[in-house]
Amino acid sequence: MTKTLLVCDCLGSQHVDFNALGELTGTACSGCHTSLCTTQIETAAKAIKAGDVVIACAQEAHRFTALAEELDAPEPICVDIRDRAGWSDDSASATAKMAALIKDALLAPPSPKSVDVITEGTCLIIGAEETAIAAAQKLSDTLAVTVLLAPGTDFLPTSAYDVVTGSLDKATGTLGRFEVRINNFQQSLTGGRGTPALTAPQNGARSECDIILDLSGGLAMFPAPEKRDGYLRADPGSQTAVADAIFTASQMVGTFEKPLYVRMEPTLCAHSRAEKPACSNCLNVCPTGAILSAGETVTIDPMICAGCGACAAVCPSGAISYDVPPPDHMFRRISALARTYRTSGGTDAALLVHDDHGAEMISLAARFGRGLPAHVIPMEVSALSGFGHAEMLAALASGFSRVDILLGPKTERDALDPQLALANAIAPDQSALLDITDPDALSDHLFGQTPTPATTDPILPIGSRRQVARLAAKALNPDLGVLALPQGAPYGAVVVDTDACTMCLACVSLCPSGALGDNPDMPQLRFQEDACLQCGLCTNVCPESAITLEPQLNLTDMALQQVVLNEEEPFGCVECGTLFGVKSTVEKIVEKLAGKHAMFANPETARMIQMCDGCRINAQYHSQNNPFAGKERPRPRTTDDYLSKRKDH
């Protein structure tokens, strides 16, 4: 069914070509309104009641959503074409951009998976007596409050909340499931005159709570404290910050939905094998400590994960993938934006990736400044750190001439910086991070860039992140065979020192991706470069230190084929001629053991080293000192043996 498109020029402040937008987006658009959210709201109500409506106004999305609830109709799709396109010094040529933004909005993401978090309102307040007690008095009617004061602090008894003294030793968990350990723990005793008496101090006291309100002003209890649900930290010297924290804590009672941001496939994880370390990229970039080592794989605590997406961006194998939304939806959005803009007559498209902070900057730049250029297509994502090299390359290969990522004030760059370096190594100087906090400066920077055409014919980004990255790299570098990459890149070759390699094949047995293989018919070490994750496990497990890694991206078809890195002549059994083992290895063992070790002191036992398994067993069995031989078996005892000892027989 064709969707209905409602557009509005917002009191005549922007020009909208409704006929072109309807045709370019495949929607039914019969006209352009002027005040769809107020005087013409009946038109919106009629369209919402009919269903399948797209309203080109994001500012009043809450109004249209409430109207849909009132009419018991499906919630309309609301898309912003005003701040991102119509309000601009370059608005005269913004129709193609508007069409691309509407097409992007029509790609509804799949419903995210989530888990319920239940909190009953037990709150631990930590801080100095004056600040903590004042907060407890405000929260005691809403939450079950316990105040933790420093040892030796005097306080007045109260029945509204609990007061204990001690020093917090450790805190773990998240909203609804915090666990704390307190040293010098003392509880107040009910009754008595003056300062309440306290119980005997106890170390290692443990308790649980749903919320922690930290007003101590000291170091945070958790890494990336602003990302830990239920942990509220405020500067005790700022009344505004303390008041905000108290208000937020008062709202944390009930059942909440926690999105499951990432999906884990343990069989693909290249973290470790046989207690030998390999890839730890996700562990190194996780800001909240939600990822822990668990033997051969890693585990992710979904309750602690804050959804920054950095782990998915740096995972070389795809064992961790961002799921809100999944990678294929991101690729579809990129492709839809580029394709619609191009087919609508737009040229020299540039992609501006941003989060909700960037959306606010764009809105301010549009309302009070120059806005965005017509060729700059904004795309809002929930996690900037998850926009890795695969997404950057996919955008460049889909028709964008460059990719700019607008950073927010709290964006972690631990993953973004190396991902940007990797993308620029494959497509030089076409991607950048914009650390700009002023809306006018953002507009000036974007208007100051010289528009350039796309460097390749568009591709269709389909497949895993590794597959899309390789496809895009090949399209962006049609005349190059092998690209040098920075250290830590997830693509590359394995270089073997054939003089040092003994063909033990330990690397083959432990390679997590199957990039290294053997030949069952002869001693060979084979390698398929396309499958190599550069995890480093082969270098760590090699007993001869004969393997090194070379980060590179081989764009030729040879990367998809197995090549022989090392091979040797097999050894023939001296008895039956069956080929087994490696000739050089057998000869080296004979050289070291024959006549020099007690077990191989005579020529007969030394010769067994040169035999296959079957011949070696036969030789041992028929040798003079047969290890399989035993004493003569005793004769079975019969009834006659027992009866012969009786006197009556």
Image (tube, grey):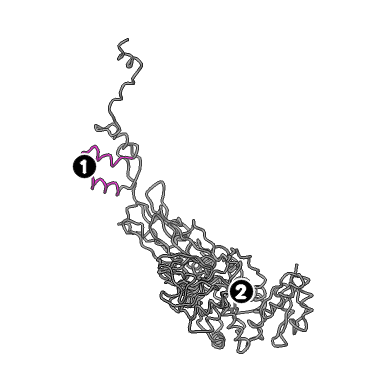
Q: Main secondary structure of the magenta part?
A: helix
Q: Which residue is mark 1?
A: 598
Q: In terms of secondary structure, where does tag 2 sit?
A: helix
* Marked residue nearer the N-terminal end (1 or 2): 2
- Compare residues 189 and 134 and report the one nearer the observer: 189
Q: What kind of residue is marked 1?
A: Ala
Q: In terms of secondary structure, where does tag 1 sit?
A: helix
Query: Is residue 461 visible to the viewer in this orientation of the structure?
Result: no
Give percent across and percent down for residue 229: 53, 70
In the figure, 587 relative to 235: above or below? Answer: above
Instruction: Judge the density around disc 1: few (<14), some (14-19), many (≥20) Cα neighbours within 10 Å.
Output: few
Q: Is residue 233 left or right of residue 364?
A: left
Q: Which mark, residue 389? A: none
Provide the residue span drawn in magenta: 585-612
Q: Is residue 426 left or right of residue 593?
A: right
Q: Is residue 232 left or right of residue 571?
A: right
Q: Are marks 1 and 2 in contact (CB under 8 Å)?
A: no
Give residue 603's quadrant in the image: top left
Q: What is the spatial separation of the Cα atoms under label 1 and label 2, in whole angstroms?
A: 75 Å
